[in-house]
Amino acid sequence: MNQADIPTDAALHALAADTGALLRRRHHRLVTAESCTGGWIAKAVTDVAGCSDWFDCGMAAYSYEAKQAMLGVNPHTLETQGAVSRETAIEMVSGALVHSGASVAVAVTGIAGPGGGSDDKPVGTVWIAWKRRGGYAGARLFHFGGDRDAVRRQTVAAALRGLVETVDAP
């Protein structure tokens, strides 16, 4: 892993500002549903002055119970697929829209490390899902390298980039 691949605070701020400008232009409000990033996406966007024009709320849900209560993730999904899965990410992003006034959502769930990985889901495995209200959710699997901080930084950046793609999609 090259250190140049790890987004700096300045790079994350610029990405959040660009994402916010697009959301403002398109009259969208954002909700975040975060597990492995623990609210870092919400922090990145709320570091941008004027974010109240386009940021609705953020939910950090680590435990199965929180994912169920706050985001409506089905217990069966968690039991059969696990928290770090495409299915869980999609249920998280859909639930975030249901439980907010936002029009676009991003959800992240993954294994930031250093522990918690397995052969099937090694450290750095992250699912990110995006959805616009009234549309279909899309999800993508990432395998990030580096330590806990590096995995989380890369997740925040990928989540923001995916929001741009989601908002720009026809």
Image (cartoon, rainbow, N blue to C red):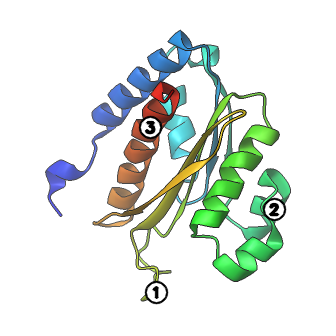
Give the labeled residue for mark 2.
68
Residue at the spot of label 1 = 118
Can residue 50 be seen in the rendering of this structure?
no
Which amino acid, mark 3?
A: Leu
Q: Residues within 10 Å of mark 1 (few under 14, many from 20)?
A: few
Q: CA distance from mark 3 to mark 1?
A: 27 Å
Q: Nearer the viewer, residue 23 or 42?
A: 23
The quadrant of the picture occupied by the N terminus is bottom left
Of 133 and 78, nearer the camera is 133
* Image height of 118 relative to 75, above or below: below
Q: Residue at x 72, y 74 (%)?
A: 78
The amino acid type found where label 2 is placed reads: Gln
Q: Is residue 95 left or right of residue 108?
A: right
> Residue 122, percent across and down?
41, 79
Secondary element type, mark 2 = helix
- Which quarter of the picture shows residue 157? top left
N-terminal label among 1 and 2: 2
Q: Nearer the viewer, residue 85 or 57?
A: 85
Q: Which residue is mark 3?
A: 160
Inspect the image, locate mark 1, and give the three-letter code of the amino acid beneath it: Ser
Residue 124, image x, y percentages: 39, 69
Under tag 1, what secondary structure?
Answer: loop
Q: Are marks 2 and 3 in contact (CB under 8 Å)?
A: no
Residue at the front extreme of this rendering: 170
